[in-house]
Amino acid sequence: MASVLSQELVTTAALLLGVSLVVFLILYLAPGDPFAALLGGRNLSGAERDAAFEALGIPKTWYGQYLTWIAHVLQGDFGISMRSGQPVVREIFSSGMKTLFLTVGSLIVTLAVAVPIAAYSAVQPSSLRARAGTLLVYLFSALPTFWLGYMLIYFFTRKLGLFPILSATDETQEYGWLYALLPVVLLGLGNGALSEIVRYLREEISRVMSEEYVRTARAKGASIWRHAYKEALLLPVSQIIAAKMPFVLGGAIIVEQVFNWPGLGRVAWQAAQDRDYPVIMAVTLLAAIVVRLGSFLHRTVYVAVNPRASQQ
Amino acid sequence: MSTPPLLRIEDLRTYFYSRVKHAFVRSVDGVDLEVVRGETLGIVGESGSGKSVTMLSAVGLVTAGPGVITGKVTFHDEAPQDLLQGLDSNVKIERRDGRIMHITKDNQAWQKQANLNLRGVRGGKISMIFQNPRAALNPFETVGHQIAESVRLHTGMKSAAQAKERALYWLDQVRIDSPRLRYDNHPYGLSGGMSQRAMIAMALAAEPRMLIADEPTTGLDATIQARIVDLLDDLKTRLGMTMVLISHDIGVISRLSNRIAVMYGGRVMETGPTAEVLDEHANGHPYTRALLASTPRRENVTATGRLPAIEGEVLDTINVPCGCRFRARCQRVNDTVRTRCETREPELFEIAQGRRIRCWLYSPQ
Ligand SMILES: Nc1ncnc2c1ncn2[C@@H]1O[C@H](COP(=O)(O)OP(=O)(O)OP(=O)(O)O)[C@@H](O)[C@H]1O
Ligand code: SF4
Ligand SMILES: [Mg+2]
């Protein structure tokens, strides 16, 4: 088990390195000068520029710059935001946490809705409740996220008057927590993947339910879920988390726009506008980590559940 | 004869719906069976004759619809207990001209009630082993845990340590080599024969009154088969176990069972003591005779390695003829019985004490 997981960590490290290198190269090759601000906006000749770099201790080659960046990152230093002059870590920490909250929270909402409906309709496919649940799921999946979002905002602000529009940052407000939950629920239900997830889970559950070992469980008078949950729930759910993480992250960025939610999406957008290179690098890396967390979780569950995998 | 049978099945009917043919498959179509205490009842019959579904129905393990629709299953351990009690209120049957046209069944309520009826019986007083033991064991759990679970569910031994001790005892009883080692093995590490031993240990760990063994040796190598049969024979004598053994293998059946029931097209065609039913020269049902003639004995195995089969096709239980089910394949219809064979289904005529045959040739009149 430990060896499988350490292997996974190595893969993750290699992947992050690759992602950062590619993004670094794209930024390097893209028009615009990352050092324009540092050099005070002056248009320097090649020699003057070299001298200025030397004075500032900046390597001249791109790989030299990249290695310097890596060396700093390894010490937890992501540099200084060019826009705000604040350390990047401080800049993106709170927005990163907000996006993580949105992403993980919405995944939890998705699963909290999908798992019972899938389980119910796998076990009692013809029951009324199973049909109603499935219909509801299809309905949610068919509606576009942004439309659903605006409807929610309209409903809560105009109809119920619970909070004024666009006040996400004001957490002291009475219904602030509700306003924070709204996008989580929206993304969880309306991310378009809900019906696909329900279908996948339902198929997995009914497949496992007809496995012979589940019949054995029934024949011995044991709880069938106690025997079936590993293959019917743990594995497919972690599989879904791994597969959907990138999409949920993408969806989070849309929802952040709709709800004026100060998350990574907005930071990334702002940074791209401002060519705030250190922030762009950090945000990309963070997104890659979040996505990677999904497959890391899946791998961990797989190894923990599967006796063969954990023997190797 | 005064003690009631341990299990009595009366007029059990289990149907499935075939979407392809838009008709009911009458897998079990009015089965009557008795299992006497201490005996081993062998159920034989061609593939598809309803052997497995009969026993699965008796313990509420049929989940596909419509499933069990009528019948009475009485399990008499200390007091008689109707395992299908209160279930018919969930089934509505529409008949026309005596044929079932439409079945409405509240499967959810049915399953709920069945599970209630069978609590403590299924897996406890009646336990089961299946064909294909490697798939029947949970691949995600150690063999030992699965056996210990059976101990904890159905015996007074509730603590983990006690259950483990007991599970090891049963692993030893089924003669698995190095039980302590096997206890911690996952099923993938076990051979087919060892898995079946583990299954048997798991079934016995509940200390059941009755063991249902559905094709316990099918799919195993010949030498392993023989060893599993030896083991079952030994356990049954040592534990005085009542057993229902389902098999197509007449050899296995004759080795282990005291009594035999022969099934065809969802019905019992013949019952009686093993020696009499399997005696080719004695009286018997034409189907059983044909079955015996087709069993692989050395002189019957042809050069191509194929076994002679019974002439004709197995009855599809969708279009059951109105006379005898076996008529289309029967070689012994004669002029005396022909009209009756074609028009009325024979009942199980008792030709001697404990010997019944469903054939007009044995009708008392
Ligand atoms: N879940 C189901 N749905 C539809 N038909 C079924 C179902 N289970 C069994 N049957 C049908 O019922 C009939 C009897 O099946 P059963 O398994 O009892 O036969 P069997 O005598 O045990 O045969 P075998 O020796 O092949 O195990 C078969 O024709 C089978 O196709
Ligand atoms: S009842 Fe008639 S058709 Fe049926 S087995 Fe007997 S002789 Fe053959
Ligand atoms: Mg069978």
Image: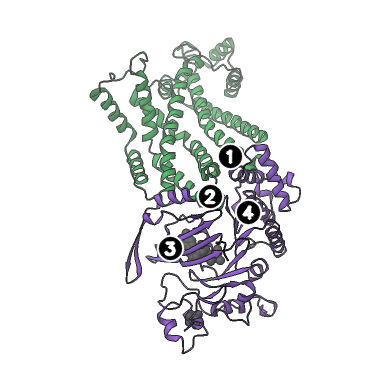
- Give the Cα separation between the discs numbered 1 and 4: 21 Å
Query: Which label number is shown at residue B134?
Result: 4
Give me the C-alpha separation between circle 3 and circle 1: 40 Å
How far apart are the alpha carbons under marks 2 and 1? 25 Å
Kindly identify the amino acid type of the residue bearing the numbered disc 3: Tyr
Residue at the spot of label 1: A302
Q: Amino acid at mark 4?
A: Arg
Chain the render paints purple: B
Amino acid type of the residue that numbered disc 1 sits on in the rendered structure: Tyr
Question: Is B231 in front, or is A274?
Answer: B231
Which mark is first along the chain, 1 or 2?
A: 2
Q: Are marks 2 and 1 on the same chain?
A: yes
Q: Are marks 2 and 4 in contact (CB under 8 Å)?
A: no
Determine the secondary structure under disc 2. helix
In this view, the residue farthest toward the front is B2
Q: Give whichever of A85, A302 is nearer the camera.
A: A302
Q: Which mark is residue A218?
A: 2
Query: Circle 3 sits on which residue?
Result: B15
The answer as to whether the residues below labels 3 and 4 share one chain is: yes
Which chain does the green colour mark?
Answer: A
Question: Closer to the observer: label 2 or label 4?
Answer: 2
In the rendered view, does B114 fall on the left or right side of A130?
right
Q: CA distance from mark 3 to mark 4?
A: 29 Å
Q: Amino acid at mark 2?
A: Arg
Q: Residue at x 25, y 21 (%)?
A: A161
Give the chain of mark 4: B
- As measured in the structure, the alpha-carbon distance from the residue carrying label 3 to the one carrying label 2 is 21 Å
A58 displayed left or right of A178: right
Mark 1 and 4 residues: CB-CB less than 8 Å, in contact? no
Chain letter for the residue marked with disc 2 in the picture: A
Secondary-structure class at tag 3? strand
Q: Quadrant of the C terminus of chain A?
A: top right
